[in-house]
Amino acid sequence: ETGVTQSPTHLIKTRGQQVTLRCSSQSGHNTVSWYQQALGQGPQFIFQYYREEENGRGNFPPRFSGLQFPNYSSELNVNALELDDSALYLCASSLGREINYGYTFGSGTRLTVV
Amino acid sequence: GDSVTQMEGPVTLSEEAFLTINCTYTATGYPSLFWYVQYPGEGLQLLLKATKADDKGSNKGFEATYRKETTSFHLEKGSVQVSDSAVYFCALSDLVSGGGADGLTFGKGTHLIIQP
């Protein structure tokens, strides 16, 4: 079975720009969650999508938005980029919304905002 | 709010040494507890989990016991190998406050270095 695939692996953007990150979930997984991992920190929950709808959200401003598609792949969009948005963005898929199903994480997209 | 505190790293040990990485938590409900491992250049992998008090999670020689009385979930391994070198994250999910829809709350991670 294929795992979680994220693209691109690295990205450099300028402050104020917009960015879209992509995630293909593991085969058979219908739930996708996104996390932001700043350097030297643990991942922080951004939001979760279940069957194409946002199912939960962490403490992130509205300029962080997402989509989930019928094939359960997902996008994370960030508008008006700030320097503090520089981080590793992790996508995780799971079989259901219940966290005890277990996540499969991708390797992440490293975003640098200059 | 919920929080997880882990011992600061890096932790440097010799091969075959005994490992303990401390983790304590604060939660409003009845959390499930997890340990994840992150190898260089890779995503996080679930190492073990425990969903209720006194449960012991175990995998690949690693163990952790859910201690409600001390709000702890310390990770242990009897004999570490060079291949165990990685960053280890303790995490919780507070099922009462929202279940999976609130995501996982992670600690800052502990970098483990095993020397031959």
Image (cartoon, coloured by chain):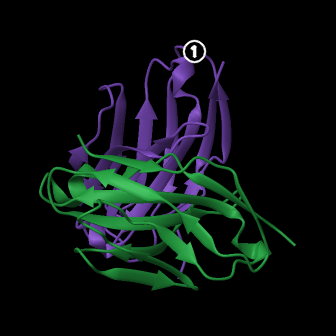
Chain colours: A purple, B green
Q: Is residue B115 left or right of residue B91?
A: right
Q: Which residue is mark 1?
A: A15
Q: Nearer the viewer, residue A83 or A62?
A: A83
Determine crowd level at label 1: few under 14, some 14-19, many 20+ residues with C-alpha closer than 10 A. some
Q: Is residue B90 left or right of residue A57?
A: right
Q: Nearer the viewer, residue A86 or B5?
A: B5
Say if A57 sits above or below A103 in the image: above
Q: Quadrant of residue A80?
A: top left
Picture residue at 47% right of the left edge, 41% below the top = A36
Residue B9 point in image, percent of width and height: 64, 49
Q: Nearer the viewer, residue B77 or B86?
A: B77
Kindly identify the amino acid type of the residue bearing the numbered disc 1: Arg
Say if A59 sits above or below A43 in the image: above
Say if A32 sits above or below A60 in the image: below
> Disc 1 sits on a residue from what chain?
A
Tally of numbered discs: 1
Tell me the element at label 1: loop
Q: Is residue B91 left or right of residue B51?
A: right
- Examine the rendering and report whether any part of residue A84 can be seen: yes
Q: Quadrant of residue A96?
A: bottom left
What is the residue that sits farthest to the right in this orientation? B116
Residue B18 point in image, percent of width and height: 65, 75
- Examine the rendering and report whether any part of residue B104 can be seen: no
Residue B23 point in image, percent of width and height: 44, 57
Picture residue at 38% right of the left edge, 49% below the top = B4
What is the residue that sits farthest to the top in this orientation? A16
Picture residue at 51% right of the left edge, 57% below the top = B89
Image quarter in which the C terminus of chain A is found: top right
